[in-house]
Amino acid sequence: MGLAQSPGPARAAETGYRAFDAKGRRVTLREIVEAQGGADVLLVGETHDDRVAHFVEAELLRLVDERYGQKSKRGTRPIALSLEMFERDVQLVLDEYLGGLIAERHFMLSSRPWKNYVSDYRPLVEYAREQKLPVIAANAPARYVSRVTGLGPDSLRTLSPTARDWLPPLPYAPASREYKAKFRRFMQGDAPAAAVPPAGATPTQPAAPTAQAPANPHAAHGGAGFLLEAQTLRDAAMAHSITEYLREKPAALVIHVNGRFHSEERLGVAEQIKHYRPLTRVLVLTIVPGEGSNDFDAGRLGGLGDFVILTEPASPSSF
């Protein structure tokens, strides 16, 4: 299985976005990086087919490492990358690849990468590999998310102790009232489909996100069932993965990338992080695709995060 070198995001991606703080003030990526000096975690919420978002993520990782990383002149903090796109049970394979113990083709065969990994997430992993940064495989295994979708959270208790090691401690915290309301609006088609992969999808073939919720959202999520609980398992798994790393490296700065539904409005993963490690300092960056207006609607967009990046409607798609 040979891999061609990824050309990376289109050069147009470098100018295909505008960044704002929550009040609507224009900011640069470097200003966002400077704000991370007082944070433990930066949650970056993307739409998975937004090529510009992937360019921004790669730039942020590089800039954060140059500003705060242990090799920088001014910084002494361990920097870690955390990804929704890899599940917790492939952490060993990911570590082996980062450490040079296995070839990339074996890594690809064994880690269940998403189908857009080479074009969109490989640049992040390769930067981490070159700079010897850890990468956290943060997500819950899809097979257990699907189990919750059909049978509910209590069905996880029948798993073996080895299987439960890939999950957050059970029972995981339920969704907040605000998150439930947001999820309900999404399922009714009243909110954008913020890059939430269906609970039953295989990681190698995630559904291409759409601008709006599907006409039959239950079908897109594998049928009616414990959909919110399955979504919350993902949130809890990612939050637990991040906070476990911070317990080992309390001075670290973690950059975590997930679908924007998981973290926008400081819900989902952000809430679960506070459950596991209440004093964790979290910044939220939400990247919103296809916003052509030159005006920042603070009432509509300001609540999405500490920072919001709007990408251009003509930006190339990954799918």
Image (cartoon, rainbow, N blue to C red):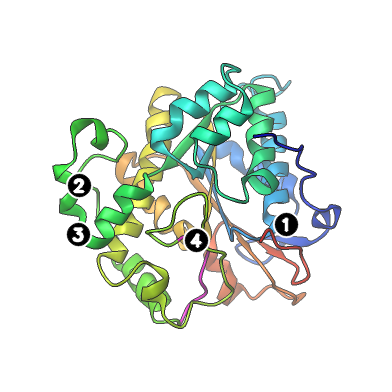
**Residue 301 in the image, given as x and y percentages of width and height:** 58, 71
Q: Spatial distance from mark 3 to mark 1, Cα to Cα?
A: 38 Å
Q: Residue 52 carries which label?
A: 1
Q: Position of residue 57 (x, y in %)?
A: 66, 47
Estimate the x, y position of residue 95 in percent, counting from the top left: 51, 24
Residues at circles 3 and 1 in contact by the CB criterion of under 8 Å: no
Q: Mark 3 points at which residue?
A: 151
Which label belongs to residue 278?
none
Q: Which of marks 4 and 1 is nearer the N terminus?
A: 1
Q: Does the magenta stretch include residue 191?
A: yes
Left or right of 278 in this view: 121: right
Q: Are marks 2 and 3 in contact (CB under 8 Å)?
A: no
Magenta stretch secondary structure, dominant: loop
- 294 relative position to 191: left or right: right
Camera-side residue of 110 and 39: 110
Mark 1, other Cα within 10 Å: few <14 / some 14–19 / many ≥20:
many
The amino acid on which the numbered mark 1 sits, given as a three-letter code, is Val
In whole angstroms, how far apart are the C-alphas of marks 2 and 1? 37 Å
What separation in Å lies between label 2 and label 4 (alpha carbons)?
A: 27 Å
